[in-house]
Each structure stands twice: as C-alpha cells, then as structure tokens.
Image (spheres, helix red, strand yellow):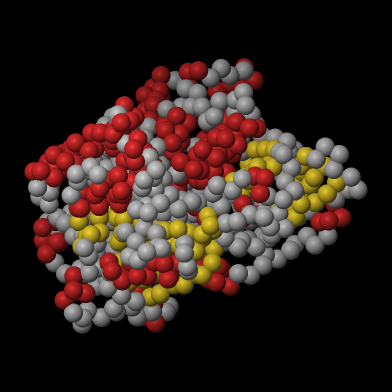
Amino acid sequence: MADNLPTEFDVVVVGTGLPESIIAAACARSGQRVLHVDSRNYYGGNWASFSFSGLLSWIKENQQKTDLSDECEDWRKLILEDEEAIPLSSKDKTIQHVEDFCFGDQDSAEGVEEAGALPKLPVFGAPAAQGVSPGPEKESPAAKGIPRGSEESPAAEGVSPGLENENPAVESPAEEPQSPEAEQAPGSEAARAAAGDGAGTAPGSGAAPSTAAGDSAPQPAKTEAAPSENAAQEPKKITYSQIVREGRRFNIDLVSKLLYSRGLLIELLIKSNVSRYAEFKNATRVLAFREGKVEQVPCSRADVFNSRQLTMVEKRMLMKFLTFCLDYEQHPEEYQAYESSTFAQFLQTRKLTPSLQHFILHSIAMVSETESSTLEGLQATKKFLQCLGRYGNTPFLFPLYGQGEIPQCFCRLCAVFGGIYCLRHAVRCLVLDRASGRCKAIVDHFGQRISANYFIVEDSYLSESTCTNVCYRQISRAVLITDQSVLNTDSEQQVSVLTVPPLEPGRAAVCAIELCSSTMTCMKDTYLVHLTCPSTKTAREDLEPVVQKLFSLNTEKETENEELEKPRVLWAVYFNMRDSSGVEKSSYAGLPSNVYVCSGPDSALGNDCAVKQAETIFREMFPTEEFCPPPPNPEDIIYDEDEIEPEESGLNNSPETKPETSAEESSSEGGAAVTKNE
C-alpha cells in the first residue's frame, strides 16, 4: 500500500491535531505538496472526539499503554553513511492517570450492542494513501473519508460564523438533529442509506444536517413537553445500558474548549471559508459558583438590567466598570497605580460589592485570583466584552458534534487542495543530512523513504532523548455524563460555562462546560460536563472535590435532600494530559532548522495558542505566502482547454440544469469550483 505514496513532497506533517491541521491546510492552499500522516486510526490526536464506545477503547488503550508493533525492524539500514537518524517515539506518553467510574449497574450493559453501529471491516495491511477511514473509534468526523473530486460539498449551511449577520449561530433547541449513523465516504449513497433512522448525513461529509438553519427538515421536529413541565418533573432515570446502546449519540472531546466569537480561530474559519464545513451553537449562559450555589452571571447590557439577583445600585456599578474596561487603555490613570497588583486587588479598589467582584474575576475575566495582574485581568475582561453580541448573548460558540470537528475541517481543506492523508501510518525516524544539518526525509513503518523540504511534527511523536531538557506542564481533565443540568431553568437545551474558584489555597480554578443534547455530543435526557484545570496532582485528586460540590455521586436516590437537588453523575472519567504549549524550539535536543514542533492542547478556554503557533510556523516556512487565503470563486477560475474537455463530456451545461446547480454552488461559496480544479 505504501508503494502508492509519492516519494517527494514539499511538506510532511506528522500528527493531525489542530495546529498541524491548520498548517497542512495553509500549505496546501498555497500550492505546496503536502503529506499528512498520523499513527493513530482517528483524526485529531489529543484534540479528537469519540463516541462512547470509542472513548472506552481509548481509555483501555491508555490504561494498558502497549507499544506499537515494529513492522520494519531493519529501517536503520536505510540510513546512508553521510546521514543520521532522529528516531521518533512509537508510544504516546501524553495521557496519564486514566480512571473511569460507572455509577450505575454496569453488569446490565453486558451484551448490549451499540445502536446503528456498522460492522467492522477487515483491515488488509495499511490504509490507502488517500481517503483513509478514521476507524470505528470516531463516529462523526468532519474529514471522515477525506473528500475526493466531486464528493466535496458544503457542510455548514446552518450555524456558520462565515455568515456575518449578528445572530446566525443560535441553533433552535426545539428540534434535535439525529446523530449520524454512517461512516462511509462523503457524498456516497451508501453513507446516506446507512443512516437508518432518518438522520442527516455526517456533519463533515459535505451535507448539512437536516436541522440546519434555513433548511427545510425532511422529518417533522420532535414534539416535547412544555419546558415548564419538564423543569418540574423528576429527571428520567438513565441506565448504563442505555448509554452503551445510544453510544453513537455521544461525541466526547478529549480537550474542552470554546470559540470566542471574535477570537483568532473564528476569524480564521471565516477568512479561509473552512466555516462551511462545520456548524456551531451558541453558549447560552455564563454561570458562577458562589457560596455553594450556582448562579447565572449577567453578561450583556440587557442581562444586567433584567437581572433579579442584582440591586439597582449594583447594576449601575457593574455597567460603569464594564464600560471602563472596554476602553481602559484611554484611561491609564485609573489603573497605573495598580499595575503591580493582582486583578483581584484592583477590583477591591473599584467600589464593587463582593458578588460583583466574584462575577467579574471568575466568570467574565476568568483569571487567577492570586496570579493574574491588573493588566491581564483588564485585557481578559475587554476580550470577553468585545465578543458579546456577535452571535448571541455570550461571547462563545461551540461546534456541533464536538471540538474534534475543527481539526478535521482543516484536514478537509488540505485534501481539497491536493493534500494526501494516511492514518495508521507510523513514522520511524527523521533523516538528517550531516553536511547541511537539515532534515531531508522520513522513513515510515514500511521502510519507505519520503523526501520533503519541511517537516511538521506534533510534540507527542518526539522521543525521550529529544525531549530530555523539556519541562512539561499537565492538564487535569474530567468528563461526566449527568442526568440533569447544574442549574435547571425553563429550557433544557443550555450550553453553560461555569468557573469554580479554588476550593483551597494552592489549587487552580476549575472551568466547567456543560453541553446539552442539541450540541450533538450526548444522548437525550443527559448532559455532558467537561472539567479542566492546570494540574497540581492527578486529575482525580484535582477535580473530584469540585465534582462532589456540584453533583451527586450516589447510585441510589435514597439520600438527604441536599443531594436530591444535585444532578446525578452516571459515568465519569479522569485523566491527565500533557500541556506542551509555550515550549521553545531550542528546548528540543538536536532538531534541524527545517523541523517544526507543534504543541498539544493547552489549559486555556480558547484556541488562540494553536492558531498563533500555526501561523508563526507557516510564516517561517513561506514568508511571502498568504496564510489560509479564501478559496477562489468559481467565476475567477480559468481552465485550460485540456482541462475543460473531459468536464464537458460528462456534464450537461444546458440552461435547464443551471438553476439546480447554482443553488449548491452559491451555498458552498466556491467549494464546488475547487472540486473541479482537483
């Protein structure tokens, strides 16, 4: 299979995380020949999303930590006398202390099959060089079966940031799209037929789900009880066997992030037109945890004046302070004396009540109470306020089907412009030319040498000898499946952001993101809760105290009244993830100048670090090229006569057919024309 690969490329990218995928897309878009490989059988690396069964497989894999089999033990013989090999790691050591818990009857799930799962196909050797299926672990990837030729079509007609109107991102909570049931190549009839329950095609398969805004849904919306009735009812009892059976309804992210509506990632999605491959839902509310209770934080001007928890005096205080933060640079006299102080100390001087100080510090600025300076707090508050109102009443968007969709969207763009993809394709070493000191090739697990000018490697692929001098931080993560929201309201379909202050000195604040079923990340009548903080101990030690404050871990409801009011945890997993962000390239031993290292996810709520890193690396490689420019419009593409002839022989360009195709092309904003150019 590997013999099908060309032996020369301009750029080889190892790893399919977000920074690597952005770089691959930018390089392919600028005309470079790109090979994008990953030893895993799914896209995204530590940025990936899994179905429930896929996550259980991932947990088992990381608890066992088995080495990958070495299929080519004599690859060192391929290294010439004037060359040197820089071995890459075959073992992922970025995940540690994985612990999962089921708070229900686990035995009842034995023999239960996942609904809608396709039979596993036998794997013969290695995957093909192009269009590799991500495997059974990932159920709804955006780059599932990388597009080829006419299979390419737009995916985001619903909630896309590419639409510049004020509120395009609010997905209707009354109608819940079905989870995709197909894993074939996008655009194929088999993929659509496999969705036996009438589900829309997979989000990245090129067709918008049936509930895309402005689309007429083929099935009637599900009728639900009135919200007021739901709020008063007891939550339905969800069993573990139900979770297993509905496992494909889950899209569980390894890393929990949101997109700031005016952040670098949204701007890049709009500029590059990658936004058409995804859909987004508004984060509907920002919450705070204070004095043992969860409260909603008023963010916008309307929220402040409609709030019942603030007095009129507090409303005026809050509006005055937030107005100051929007243009604080114009009033340096207001904060210069406190530049050496923490933001928390600065807030105490602003005549704000304790509750307002808490809201601003933990839920708006979202900065550390003990470590963040006044300027850092003001900058964070301004960023929060500037993002309000673009797509809704909070600054945040969340991608339907999970954060793992975003790397795959950029992989799709790379493939559209000629990038070649290989999953389950390990790289054994980098080949260094001793004379020039530059990397000249890689050797893969089949023993094939592939030459290139530049090499992008994700940090987890580097060997221990290369990373000897690197000091890594760690992120503590927990994922919970719960039976109700942390703050019940009239509407069940809420996407909430909650910051829990440190419960004791020396600990970090914990960021919690609660997702409802309309985000396409969990089954109906459940919520998916992501907890994240910088590590001080193991993930369970860091996060379990917060879980106990917010949720009930009892398997039975025969508990005291306080526990009855809390959401019940049905299932949980804790793990520590390596944070390789901020590591200087000079810290890695013996890397040539044309080898660039991409970091894994950081602990921040947004994605700015990944986008900055991708753009920096791209500009170092190609300083004269534009970073991820928009694709050309169909009318701007000029074809040679040789290229047009085969197109004309197979396509009818008669006037009768034009109205039908023009609707598709206008919605894709040039995507269809790019396909013709392949």
185 relative position to 507: left or right: right
51 relative position to 315: left or right: right
200 relative position to 89: left or right: left
Give the residue displayed 63% in from the left and 70% down from the top.
Answer: 66
Give the residue displayed 50% in from the left and 51% down from the top.
Answer: 601
Residue 425 image offset from top left, x and y in percent: 66, 54
* Residue 181, image quadrant: bottom left
Give the residue displayed 42% in from the left and 79% down from the top.
Answer: 110
Front in this rendered view, residue 550 or 378: 378
Name the outermost residue toward the right.
81
Residue 464 makes an appearance in the image = yes
Residue 549 image offset from top left, x and y in percent: 28, 69
Give the residue displayed 29% in from the left and 78% down from the top.
Answer: 554
In the picture shown, does residue 493 fall above or below 277? below
In the picture shown, does residue 678 fall above or below 108? above
Front in this rendered view, residue 526 or 624: 624
Residue 172 image offset from top left, x and y in percent: 24, 45
Locate the C terminus and report the quarter of the image it occupies: top right
Front in this rendered view, residue 607 or 527: 607
Residue 402 image offset from top left, x and y in percent: 40, 51
* Residue 26, image quadrant: top right
Residue 281 makes an appearance in the image = no
